[in-house]
Amino acid sequence: MYVFIGYDSPEAKELRPKLRPAHLEKLKNLNQAGKIVLAGPFADGSGSLIVFNVSTKAEVELIVKTDPYVMERVFERYEIKPFTKVLP
């Protein structure tokens, strides 16, 4: 598994509503393919987290490069980290 942490840009508040439908459609398709464990924004408005169930970091990088939130700079930066699920 891999964790994606996206940090909102100063323009995110304005951009997010415009890009949300396309972003959610992409996530919906990934979820249906079994590639997303969970996804959502941080409650403090600072960004978002997605836990991917994929084999390689390269696959996550390919997915996020084509996400509207990344392409249109809702996220000013992001991190991808390997993740080990312990519970549940």
Image (spheres, rainbow, N blue to C red):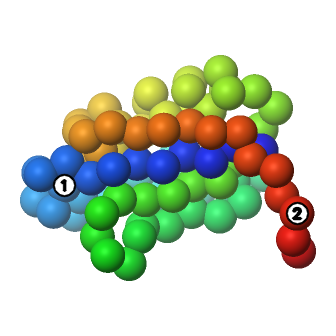
Q: Is residue 84 visible?
A: yes
Q: Residue at x 19, y 55 (%)?
A: 12
The correct choice, above or below, for 43 with respect to 57 in the image is below
- From the viewer's perspective, is 84 left or right of 78? right
Which quarter of the figure has residue 44? bottom left
Q: Residue at x 33, y 50 (%)?
A: 7
| SS of the residue under disc 2 | loop
Locate residue 85, reporting x and y percent: 83, 58
User: What's under tag 2, amino acid-wise?
Assistant: Val
> Which of 57 and 21 lies nearest the eye of the viewer?
57
Which quarter of the figure has residue 58? top right
Q: Where is the C terminus found, in terms of image quarters?
A: bottom right
Locate residue 25, reporting x and y percent: 48, 54
Residue count near mark 2 (Cα–Cα under 10 Å), binned few <14, some 14–19, many ≥20: few
- From the viewer's perspective, is 65 left or right of 8? right
For disc 2, the marked residue is 86
The correct choice, above or below, for 41 with respect to 21 in the image is below
User: What's under tag 1, amino acid-wise?
Assistant: Ala
Locate residue 2, reporting x and y percent: 69, 43
- Which is more N-terminal, label 1 or label 2? 1
Marks 2/1: CA–CA distance: 33 Å
The outermost residue toward the bottom is: 43
Locate residue 65, reporting x and y percent: 44, 27
- From the viewer's perspective, is 22 left or right of 54? left
Residue count near mark 1 (Cα–Cα under 10 Å), binned few <14, some 14–19, many ≥20: many
Q: Is residue 19 visible?
A: no
Numbered circle sitting on residue 12 = 1
| SS of the residue under disc 1 | helix
